[in-house]
Amino acid sequence: MLQGTPILVLREGTERQRDKSATGNNIAAARAIADAVRSTLGPRGMDKMLVDGMGDITITNDGVTILKEVDVEHPAAKMLVEVAKTQDQQCGDGTTTAVVLAGELLKRAETLLEQNIHPTVITRGYQIAVQQAQKLLEKEIGTTVKPGDQGILLDCATTAMGSKGVFGSRDHLAKIAVDAVNQIVEPRGDKVVADVDKILIQKRHGGTIQDTELISGIILDKERGHPRMPKLVRQAKIALLNSALEIKKTEIESKINIKNPSQIQNFLDEEDKTFRQMAEQVKAAGANVLVCQKGIDDVVLHYLAKDGVLAVKQVKESDMQKLARATGAKIVTGLKELSASDLGSAETVEEKKVGDDHMTFVTGCHNPRSVSILIRGGTEHVTQEVERSLQDALKVVSSVLEDGVVCPGGGATEIDLAVKLRQWAPSVGGREQLAVEAFAQALEVIPWALAENGGYDAINVLIELRGAHGGANANKNIGVNVSTGKADDMWKLHVVEPARVKRQALSSAIEVANMVLRIDDVIASKKGGGGGPPGGGGGGHPH
Ligand code: ADP
Ligand code: MG
């Protein structure tokens, strides 16, 4: 009876793509993202200038920063952006690698799809391949680091920063990164943990990158609250407060009926008394330094100055926490609760001039392991890129300390995996073998891109690399020397990376590639903005 009557399941205006067209579109979108960041890979990679809606610019070479800044529409492309974010959280480095790899896996999958190989077979083959790759990485390619080997840590830090715009100062910055992580590493069972979030980073433009320094203690990017306060306090007793020292203005307008002038005076006196009490409470607890997360009224600052207390206001919450850890202070919510036992200690608290601004340095802390990095550089864009590079380097050094396994960089690891996987593929058999081979081929995109970005003939480089990794004289450490465009020993060139970066890049790339491949149906509901009255209020302007 119903024959010929279409049944509408989806709301009108919903777009639907199925099977090949869905997969094809998704792959194209994801590849577009991968292609966009490929030219930034490696030490010879180019930078990108990103301009946001407000006209602010960011100049960077950092994969995850690029992808975070651009406004991506397509859902499959968004998935690739997520990969970069995951990689960044887990390792801090290898974000471009993960995205480029995912794009290449999809490109190879497309070729297989054209040969009528079902997506399920491809994803299964990829899964088999990545498991084998992880095994090879752990057993054959990775090298265990001797505990206490500082040279390797420095090499990893320099390699991580090699591709960033801080090239000229990378030795200086690498040393800072290694020293900083060494200070915060803690034993846990028979392993160690190095939580880089414990390292406080402040930046001030002015000076040069070479002026960037490691400071044992905490730096606050704030000056003291009142010019009469001491600039320097020795044997500091520090109170940390996370509420404001102000009299709250009432939300509703309140009216006070004043009948004669003495009442005004009473009212003002009362206010003054409250402010004075606040300052007295700080003094009574025995503090000579007060750090407040919120504001402090000018009158309170005045009384604190009179009492010789150095007070700093409007400090970031994360800085407060680091300060608490460093000085042993407890953050209190109200002055009433403040007692001597809540105070932290430091040898000195001092306001110093850095560039054109003032900063407060808390040194000789109760916890000697607290460190800060003060980043300097010509302009804000420079200090920002230095910060991103240092973040990468800090995480890389901490992963080497925690895991103790490194691999050669410069594409050596990827090409070695590719050669070994190709040899192993026949043992898989069936159609999955084709996917394993495609996976191996996809890995070669990394040395390929490193060579290409260096301006070399990528085909020649790849042929040379494959030769060096196979046969009797195979050497797993041969990668791309980006200065010569030749195959070279990466250990000798000190180009090494934590195994964790490679492991995570492989697993995140395969995860997203398989996720995209498994989708055979895209059902997109109508955009929220497009739902206006048809033909109403003409004008093609989006805003
Ligand atoms: P990612 O975001 O993936 O870390 P990068 O732009 O930092 O991307 O590039 C990382 C790649 O560059 C890695 O494969 C690394 O081995 C390689 N690399 C870094 N320094 C060198 C070098 N001096 N010579 C050759 N390859 C290098
Ligand atoms: Mg990197």
Image: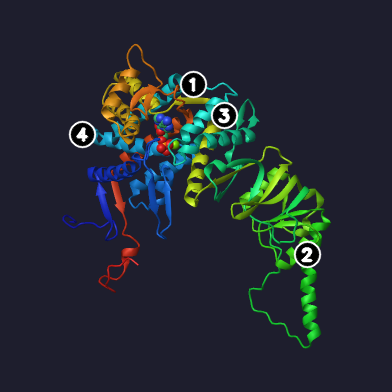
Q: Which residue is mark 2?
A: 303
**Marks 3 & 2, CB-CB < 8 Å contact:** no
Occupied quadrant, residue 250: bottom right
Residue 504 placement (x, y as % from top left)? 45, 33
Q: Which residue is mark 4?
A: 116
Foreground mark, 3 or 2? 2
**Which comes sooner in the sequence, label 1 or label 3?**
1
| Residue drawn at x 60%, y 24% as measured from the top left | 148
Q: CA distance from mark 1 to mark 4?
A: 41 Å
Occupied quadrant, residue 407: top left
Q: Which residue is mark 3?
A: 401
Q: Amino acid at mark 3?
A: Leu
Helix, strand, or loop for circle 1?
strand
In this rendered view, identify the residue nearer to me: 492 or 139: 492
Q: Amino acid at mark 2?
A: Tyr
Instruction: Indicate if the residue with disc 2 has its beta carbon within 8 Å of ligand 2.
Output: no
Q: Is residue 215 visible?
A: yes
Q: How is the image coloured?
A: rainbow
Mark 2 residue crowding within 10 angstroms, few (<14) / some (14–19) / many (20+): some
Judged left or right of residue 481, residue 390 is right
Q: CA distance from mark 3 to mark 4?
A: 47 Å
**Which comes sooner in the sequence, label 3 or label 2?**
2
**Which comes sooner in the sequence, label 1 or label 4?**
4
**Marks 3 & 4, CB-CB < 8 Å contact:** no
Helix, strand, or loop for circle 3?
helix
**Which comes sooner in the sequence, label 1 or label 2?**
1
Q: Which residue is mark 1?
A: 143
